[in-house]
Image (cartoon, rainbow, N blue to C red):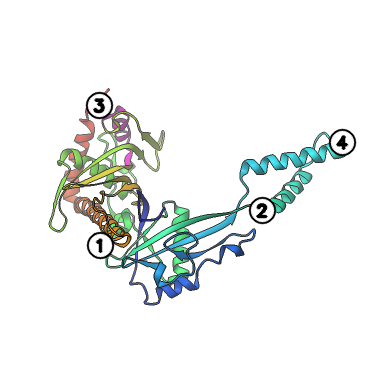
Amino acid sequence: MGFERGSLSLRMLYLPRALPEDAVDRFARAAAPPIKTLTTEEIHGWVGGRHLLDLPVTDANARFGGYPRVTLMQAQRKIPGSLLRATIQMEEQARMNAEGRAFLDRKTRSEIRQETVARMLPQMPPQLRGIPVVVDEPAGIVYAGAVSEKQCDALRVNWLRTIGMDLIPVDAQSAAVRRRSVDPRGWARSHFSPELSDDAAEADPGGDFLTWLWFASEERKGEVDHAGLGRFAYMLEGPLLFGRDEGDGALEAVVRKGAPLASGEARAALMAGKKLLRAKLTIARGEDVWSGTLDARSFTLRSLRLPDIAEALDPISHFQERMTRLAAFRDMLFALYDRFLDDRAEPMAWATAIGAIRKWVSGRKVRR
């Protein structure tokens, strides 16, 4: 799904420098081949932002409302697994009946499989997938529907080949460097559990951030007054994913039903040294509400719902308004991360915060 309607699942990536003036021409030169050229081998390349067969790439379909907008398309023919298995079994049975055999050796079964795939694959309809991309040039941010690491890697490789620069995924580490010029790899390790030593903790700026945000939402009223963004409130909701990279016992725990934040399972996870890695984040400013699931380590957003656009707008204005509202959520998320960084990067401030968080963890009241 693109960025024009509905909820959004995306990753943000930093644009190291401005797009070249001939960016659209570069996308056009690396465009996906026409779908009629698809044989049994995968084809991929860039198409315009309107749909997965949006060729050729031109200014008319690679820019929309002032935003560069393209899609990295992949097309392939694929035999559905159940159909392939059934056809192979039918061919094997026919071979055994014809030759009067009770079973087939491994070599024969392999040959039948290869022959079946070679015969069936050209008859399969094309399957299309795409990674939609929108560039916010003033902010130096690329939004991409690439929520998996495999998709993100494919996007970066093709972007580098096409535009001549790598994209830098926005995550807990890169955002800290970009926004506060601090490297989380140099931070002292910290546990939020009052029962564990910091020596056993792993360096995890994402887990530190989201757990700190949960604490701040409950103990610091969950409100922010920001000079540029105004006043907004935030809260976390389940389902919750807790985790740690090493240690005894389960390394991940998911709390879904009931009241996850007030559950005994959530408290137990915190006491065991796990940190909050994924949760639903809701931000409200005035009458506008944003809500989606945040992965703390990669800053991946899933099922992000933007505030409704009440008035009827033409398609370009509607898209621009959605991008404005997406940028507002991004800036408020970064504002929250900045406040965390101001605590985390200052040893005395962090020592105070750790003490308060451990008291909050040990004193949590559990609903039964």
Q: In the structure shown, which secondary structural element does the residue marked by tag 2 occupy? A: helix
The residue pinned by badge 4 equals 100
The residue positioned 15% from the left and 58% from the top of the image is 228
Q: Nearer the viewer, mark 2 or mark 4?
A: 2
* Residue 38 visible: yes
Q: Nearer the N terminus, badge 4 or badge 1?
A: 4
x then y, percent, for residue 144: 39, 58
The residue pinned by badge 1 equals 181
* Residue 190 visible: no
Q: Nearer the viewer, mark 1 or mark 2?
A: 2
| Distance Cα–Cα, label 2 vs label 4 | 31 Å
| Distance Cα–Cα, label 1 vs label 2 | 55 Å
Above-or-below relation of 253 to 145: above
Q: Main secondary structure of the magenta part?
A: helix
Task: Identify which amino acid the numbered label 2 is placed on.
Answer: Gln
Residues marked 3 and 2 touching at CB (< 8 Å)? no
The residue positioned 72% from the left and 50% from the top of the image is 114
Task: Identify which amino acid the numbered label 1 is placed on.
Answer: Ser
The residue pinned by badge 2 equals 123
**Extent of the magenta region:** 262-276
| Distance Cα–Cα, label 3 vs label 2 | 58 Å
